[in-house]
Amino acid sequence: MPGIERASYRTGFVERLGEAARLPAITIEAADLPDDVLALLDRLLDLGGTYGDSEAGDPIQYDELRIEHDQGDVEIVVHNRGRRRVQD
């Protein structure tokens, strides 16, 4: 089981995806997290990737969870959560 070192989360609305790095991030060291939260983060390591449709909203709703652990980093990005793209 990989050792989680820290987790960071950023969320907000951006006009272009390239602006997402400017959103403020909340970073928490593993030592500051309870064991049950660390266990939950450990279960998320297999879910790395990008989800949602970045074209479904204007502005784009952006959520990013980055989990740093001793075997590398996992990033989970979700675009426009809770929105569904309507096809013509």
Image (cartoon, rainbow, N blue to C red):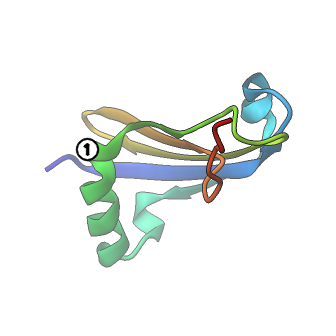
Is 51 or 37 nearer to us in this picture? 51
The residue that label 1 is drawn on is 46
Q: Is residue 9 left or right of residue 45?
A: right
User: Is 64 positioned to the left or the right of 11 in the image?
Assistant: left
Measured as percent of width and height from the top left, residue 50 is found at 48, 35
**Relative to 48, 3 lies left or right:** left
* Picture residue at 27% right of the left edge, 38% below the top: 70
Badge 1 local density, few (<14 within 10 Å), some, or many (20+)?
few
Quarter holding the C terminus is top right
- The three-letter amino acid code for the residue at tag 1 is Asp
Asked if residue 70 shows in the view, the reply is yes
* Residue at 70% in and 40% down: 56
Camera-side residue of 71 and 49? 49
Secondary structure under tag 1 reads helix
Percent coordinates x, y for residue 6 in the rendering: 45, 51
Image height of 63 relative to 87, above or below = below
Up/down of 46 relative to 36, above or below: above
**Residue at image coords 20%, 46%:** 2
Q: In the displayed orientation, state which residue is furthest to the front.
A: 88
Q: As drawn, which residue projects farthest toward the top? A: 18
Give x and y (percent) for residue 45: 29, 47
Residue placed at 30% from the left, 77% from the top?
36
